[in-house]
Amino acid sequence: LRSEGWLITDDVEKDRGGNVDHFVAGPTGAFAIETKSGRHRAADRNQAIANAVWAKEKFGQRWVTAILCVGTDPPEVPQRHGYAWVVGENDLVSFLRHPPRL
């Protein structure tokens, strides 16, 4: 994605502790990506949402989409859970290039 002009920032330290695993911005929008090697849990989705809210303010974006990218037992297709999307690692780049319309 970098070669296509996307901004990718990894391991962004938050002001009050913690981090955003990946902040990605490109022609289809801005995304805060929380990565987990295991299965997804509600707490992980909530962390992704909190990171998106923080990144929206930090990077002056109009909207930042929260993504939880999981390595174990990913959904067959990206799934929306409230304000967060859960995607498998093999679907992440495709999702960023072509996110679903809400």
Image: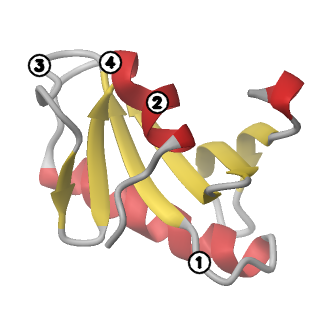
Give me the C-alpha separation between circle 1 and circle 4.
26 Å
Which element is circle 1 on? loop
Comparing labels 4 and 3, the label whose residue is closer to the camera? 3
Q: Residue at x 78, y 38 (%)?
A: 8
Give, as a three-letter code, the residue at label 2: Ser
The residue that disc 2 covers is 94
Task: Give above or below for 67 relative to 53.
Answer: above
In the picture, which quadrant includes the N terminus?
top right
Tell me which numbered mark, 4 or 3, is placed earlier along the sequence: 4
Comparing labels 1 and 2, the label whose residue is closer to the camera? 2
Q: Are marks 1 and 3 in contact (CB under 8 Å)?
A: no
Comparing labels 2 and 3, the label whose residue is closer to the camera? 2
The residue that disc 3 covers is 73
Give, as a three-letter code, the residue at label 3: Asp
Label ID, residue 31:
none
Comparing labels 4 and 2, the label whose residue is closer to the camera? 2
The residue that disc 4 covers is 37
Q: Residue at x 29, y 17 (%)?
A: 71
**Quick one: label 2, few (<14), some, or many (20+) residues within 10 Å?**
few
Q: Are marks 1 and 2 in contact (CB under 8 Å)?
A: no
Label ID, residue 63:
1
Give, as a three-letter code, the residue at label 1: Trp
Which element is circle 4 on? loop
Q: Quadrant of residue 87?
A: top left
Asked whether, in this view, residue 69 is left or right of residue 94, the answer is left
Which element is circle 2 on? helix
Asked whether, in this view, residue 38 is left or right of residue 16, the answer is left
